[in-house]
Image (cartoon, rainbow, N blue to C red):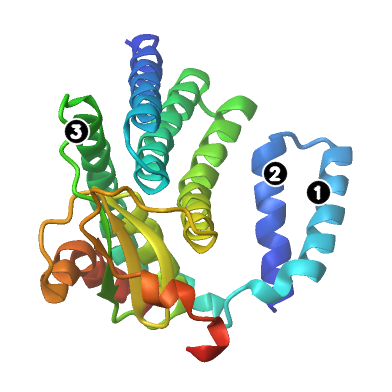
Amino acid sequence: MTSLLPKVLITVGLLFDLLGCIGLVRLPDVYNRAQAATKCVTLGTCLILFGVATQFGVSALGMKAVLCMLFILFTSPVGAHAIVRGAYKSGVKMWEGSVVDAYRDVATTKPEER
Amino acid sequence: MKQLLSCVLTFLLWLALTWSLTPSDIAAGVFISIVIAVILGDIYPEHPQAVFDPKRLFWLAVYVPYFLYFMVRANLDVAYRVIHPDMPIRPGIVKVKTTLRGDIGKLALANSITLTPGTLSVDIVGDDLYIHWINVTTMDPEEQTGTIVSHFERILRRIFR
């Protein structure tokens, strides 16, 4: 049982990572792709690291895996935010099927005019 | 005070990362913690003792499983949209309002929104959050706010004030 759990966790994590990569290829624009990449890859990678942590228990390797999990959980949304905001500000167009864009007016005004 | 807290936390993190108690590792850890505390101690919050408020810790303990549940749902949601042959997406950027005041509260809200079903924080301007939504279900700002932020705000308000 103890040897099965890590394998299951790592397999499920890899599956989510794979889904994130398929999303990167299939979805139409950078904003939708960032969605798939952030969500699936964060959970997938966290599950892989959690699998490593359950395999090695309370040891140097297990602790490092848990800490990496926390760091990814905190930093990956911030990274996605920075990429998407940077893409929008440098003029990357949204997919033509997009239904609403409330951000256009704010993004084009300069910060000091707000 | 802030510098001392920063130093202790950094040192604990160092111990967890190296996972060894040899004198040379500890000496290196103490040295690095002091350097980091002197350089970066200013970014710590003004009232660190608020972290130990049991009420806040209780709501944090409520929030973590609640958040994990939504995170798993988000992944199944994305997986469904990606695998479905027709890709049922209706993307757009919407504007929602938050009632949270503190910077850390807003950060936690924006990060939670990014990791939950179909939404990704693009920018925060004052009290307005600009959210990229992969499946816009309503054009009404009130309903948009209700769907995206309200259920997190309810708990986050109790953690961060």
**Residue A17 found in image quarter:** top left
Instruction: Mark 1 or mark 3: name the one nearer the start of the chain.
Output: 1
Query: Which residue is tagged 2?
Result: B15
Pointer 2 chain? B
Drawn side of residue B81 relative to residue A107, left or right: left
Pointer 3 chain? B
Could you tell me which residue is drawn at 48 percent across and 80 percent down?
A109
Name the residue type under label 3.
Answer: Met
Query: Which residue is tagged 1?
Result: B29
Q: Is residue B1 above or below residue A51?
A: below
Asked which secondary structure carries label 3, the reply is loop
Query: Which residue is tagged 3?
Result: B87
Name the residue type under label 2.
Answer: Leu
Q: CA distance from mark 1 to mark 2?
A: 8 Å
**Residue B143 found in image quarter:** bottom left
Q: CA distance from mark 3 to mark 2?
A: 47 Å
The furthest residue to the bottom: A113
Instruction: Mark 3 or mark 2: name the one nearer the start of the chain.
Output: 2
Drawn side of residue A101 relative to residue A61, left or right: left
Contact, mark 3 vs mark 2 (Cβ under 8 Å): no
Q: Quadrant of the C terminus of chain B?
A: bottom left
| Residue B61 in sight from this viewpoint | no
